Image (cartoon, rainbow, N blue to C red):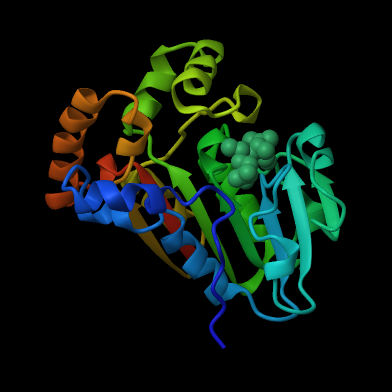
Amino acid sequence: MTLILTPKDTDEAAAERAEVAAGRLPERYGTAWQRPFLDRVAAGLKPGARVLDVGSGARPTVPADQRPEGCHWVGLDVSEHELERAEDGDYDERVVGDISSPLPQLAQSFDLVISWQVLEHVPSMAAALATQHRSLVPGGRMVAMLSGAWGFYALAARVVPYRISSKAQERLLGFPAEDKFPTKYDGCTDRGLRKRLEAGGWSSWDIVPLYKAGGYLRFNRPLQRSYLAYENWAHRRQKPNLATHYVIDAVA
Ligand SMILES: C[S@@+](CC[C@H](N)C(=O)[O-])C[C@H]1O[C@@H](n2cnc3c(N)ncnc32)[C@H](O)[C@@H]1O
């Protein structure tokens, strides 16, 4: 039976489909942006799998009631406070640790390592990938979703102080400021990821570029239209270094 995981975040596509039908948003916005990530996680999630959920904090990437039987789910986060916010039963184990440090206690302990919107926050992408590789058994799989370094919000994050940008996102988009974490964007491009995966001893990998950040500008339609003209160009011309997000699917 094929496992189908439901997104834990709001399915923006459901709201955006009407905009797609009206021709105000491109076709690709009609698919939930979590889908390419979740489908790959589902493919690697077998009964009894040992899973390391990196940077999962208050909300595991896959809720306990959607996991196949016998999975052992370990939540890892640099913030003890975030892990404490999780519900009872969300994790079989909680580990406080920085994924860009070596964490030798996790070596070769997992069949699947996943992360949702975490790798853009780490100070060293190479070090974080190395720890994830080390945590997997040989042949184990890593599936990660992250934001790209050249998305407009990533560029804004580099020039607008963190406290101001998280307050602005709260006001304009309704994202709670306490759920925002400082970003680094180290190696968060197609080229940067390829280079680090190649040097990191992974046996195979696939990087899926996604072009979908217009939703962040829904508070200003003229601005959104101008942005979409640029994003459509990057998508049409297949400029993977300009992608707004990436899914990495790699085998150790
Ligand atoms: C944007 S949140 C995503 C949380 C969760 N994955 C979700 O989707 O709800 C980023 C998470 O990564 C954690 N984090 C940031 N840097 C980290 C690091 N170096 N090692 C482990 N976790 C980290 C943060 O504490 C936070 O919980």
Give the quarter the ligand 1 occupies.
top right
Which quarter of the rendering shows the N terminus?
A: bottom right
User: Residue 223 at x, y = what percent?
Assistant: 22, 24
Left or right placement of residue 174 versus residue 216 in this view:
right
Left or right placement of residue 36 versus residue 176 in this view:
left
Location of residue 192 (image quadrant): top left
Left or right placement of residue 234 versus residue 3 in this view:
left
Q: Residue at x 60, y 58 (%)?
A: 114
Q: Is residue 110 visible?
A: no
User: Residue 159 at x, y = what percent?
Assistant: 39, 13
User: Residue 251 at x, y = what percent?
Assistant: 52, 69
Closest to the observer, 37 or 32: 32
Q: Residue at x 47, y 60 (%)?
A: 37
Relative to 39, is 218 above or below? above
Relative to 73, is 123 above or below? above
Q: Residue at x 31, y 45 (%)?
A: 212
Q: Residue at x 32, y 46 (%)?
A: 191
